[in-house]
Amino acid sequence: MFTHIPLIDFGPFLNGTDEDRQKVSSEIGDACRNVGFFYLLNHGVSSSLIERVYEQAERFFSQSIEEKMKLYIGSCPYGNNRGYTPMLEQKLSLKGDLKEGFDFAMELPADDKDRIERGASLYGPNLWPDNLEGFRECIYDECYLSMVSLGHRVLEAFALSLNLPPNYFKSMCQKPMVTMRLLYYPPQPIIIDEDQLGCGAHTDYECFTLLSQSNQSGLQVRNNKGEWINAKPIPNTFVVNIGDLMQRWTNDQFKSTIHRVINTSGTSRYSIPVFFGPDYFAEVKCLMTDQIAKYEPVIVGEYLTQRFYDTYHYRQKDSTSSM
């Protein structure tokens, strides 16, 4: 019955003793079990870099719809769920979400061996604008790669909190399914239509999410009394939340908590989520050998592909047309 989201200082985990690391891991484990969300402070990613990514997001979304649609996710030749998502494209709200996005993930060649020989359809190249100088260098070479590194350290903390070796997840995250999104939310009317929110009530699909919020509030987290708790922006922090795969992996120890976004700030809102998942062919099955598994094992790439079909308009059209 949480009423607030805990704030955890990650600095001692990154730079402290084994005792410090264990203490922080225990705090993170408590947050994952009781809330499913926490703020991460002193995470090692510079605030100046995040500010530059927001500047690049504003550059991208301020372009004409015609220019942005050149990178439309539904026209991506690789079919790996990357590119621009226009307003209402993602349907976490019944009528479609009031947001625009730009998705990219690990940059891999079109002839990547796992993609070509083993059918790892979500691997491959990204789509990049050719008219925004410095865009890719900032958001991918600098920010994305830094966020992937941070994600590996968060996984170490998760492992310790579960009484596992800190490198337990490492072998399953050699080519991790990590997607970073730039998101733009226009102002939304104060009168809320539950069927059309900035981002409808949902849980995230992957293991966990690292989220940077701009100064505007909008993220709300639902506790198990059904109350919506505001996750207000805290400077120089990331919001971390557990996703469905980690809930499955931990047999419901870690909670994948329902959340939504409603931008009633009266101004534009931007955010930068990074969704961290394991390798495409990693198998997620119950970690608790002394418990009856609540979920069947799943292959990560197959699971995520199905979840994308459930919520992306362009994939639903493709599915309908092929039936």
Image (cartoon, rainbow, N blue to C red):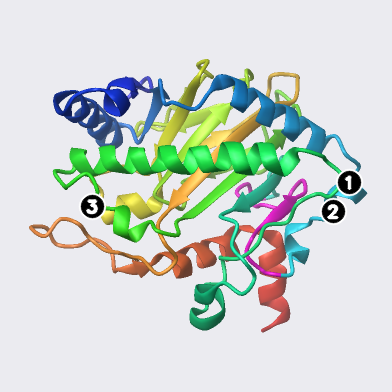
Q: Which residue is mark 1?
A: 65
Inspect this view and state whether residue 194 appears: no
> In front: 179, or 37?
179
The magenta stretch spans which residues? 78-94
Q: Residue at x 55, y 29 (%)?
A: 212
- What kind of residue is marked 1? Ile
Residue 3 on the magenta segment: no
Quarter residue 20 falls in: top left
- What kind of residue is marked 2? Met
Quarter residue 37 falls in: top left
Count the marks. 3
Badge 2: few (under 14), some or many (20 or more) residues near its Cα, within 10 Å? Answer: some
- Magenta stretch secondary structure, dominant: loop
Q: Are marks 2 and 1 in contact (CB under 8 Å)?
A: yes
Q: Residue at x 63, y 30 (%)?
A: 262
N-terminal of the pair, mark 1 or mark 3, is 1
Q: Which residue is mark 2?
A: 69
Quarter residue 186 falls in: top right
The spot of residue 279 in percent (x, y) is 42, 62
The spot of residue 57 in percent (x, y) is 73, 34
- Rounded to the nearest angstrom, the CA distance separating label 3 from label 2 is 41 Å
Q: Which residue is mark 3?
A: 168
Q: Secondary structure at mark 1?
A: helix
- Rounded to the nearest angstrom, the CA distance separating label 2 from label 1 is 6 Å
The spot of residue 108 in percent (x, y) is 59, 62
Q: Please state if 5 lies on the left or on the right of 130 as rendered.
A: left
Using the image, determine if residue 289 lies above or below residue 23.
below
Badge 1: few (under 14), some or many (20 or more) residues near its Cα, within 10 Å? Answer: few
N-terminal of the pair, mark 3 or mark 2, is 2
1 or 3: mark nearer the eye: 3
